[in-house]
Amino acid sequence: MKITADTNVLVRALVQDDLEQAKAASALLQEAELVAIPLPVLCELVWVLRRVYAFSPADCVQAIEALLTSRTVVTDRPSVTAGLKLLTTGGDFADGVIAFGGRALGAERMATFDRRAAHLLNESGEPVLLLSS
């Protein structure tokens, strides 16, 4: 079976906080021939792990990297790598994904009001236009 994994399936498999759901989610992920993980799912996953389960950025990086080691997982790996790079430096995974995705679509730089994101993106080599409010 080829599936798209929703955020809640990944959370259950990673966190194991509901034993029945964790067992079902883990079994599904192990048995699936292909597990598609769209970028919004990974952005939500990091948000949930950070806000609800108090995962550190390093724990989130480790969780996503563990998912990516599976030969059945399919995702936009270059975008995920950009997100992980920013998360590792203290930024937001989604900001890294967004900046990378924009460049892939032809943008020259990411425009934002977020000073922290702009600084971290700039430090990682992503061109940024910081708008003032």
Image: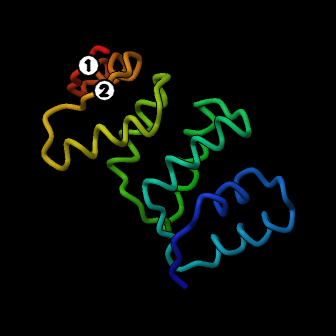
N-terminal-most mark, 1 or 2: 2
Q: Amino acid at mark 1?
A: Leu
Around disc 1, counting alpha carbons within 10 Å, would you say few (fewer than 14), some (14 to 19), or many (20 or more)?
Answer: few
Answer with left or right where residue 99 lies relative to residue 70: left
- Badge 1 is on which residue? 131
Q: Residue furthest front?
A: 133
* Alpha carbon distance from label 1 to label 2: 6 Å
Q: Amino acid at mark 2?
A: Thr
Around disc 2, counting alpha carbons within 10 Å, would you say few (fewer than 14), some (14 to 19), or many (20 or more)?
Answer: some
Q: Position of residue 105 (x, y in %)?
A: 18, 50
Indicate the secondary structure of the residue bearing disc 2.
strand
Residue drawn at x 29%, y 37% is 99
Answer with left or right where residue 54 lies relative to residue 104: right
Q: How many marks?
A: 2
Quadrant, the N terminus: bottom right
Residue drawn at x 57%, y 42% is 46
Decide: is 19 above or below 92.
below
Q: Are marks 1 and 2 in contact (CB under 8 Å)?
A: yes
Decide: is 115 above or below 127.
above
Q: Position of residue 76 (x, y in %)?
A: 36, 56
| 97 or 32: nearer the viewer | 97
- Badge 2 is on which residue? 112
Indicate the secondary structure of the residue bearing disc 1.
loop
Residue drawn at x 38%, y 43% is 81
Quadrant, the C terminus: top left
| 68 or 95: nearer the viewer | 95
Decide: is 44 above or below 128.
below
Q: Residue furthest bottom?
A: 1
Answer with left or right where residue 117 lies relative to residue 47: left
Q: Position of residue 48 (x, y in %)?
A: 64, 44
Q: Quadrant of residue 57?
A: top right
Q: How is the image coloured?
A: rainbow
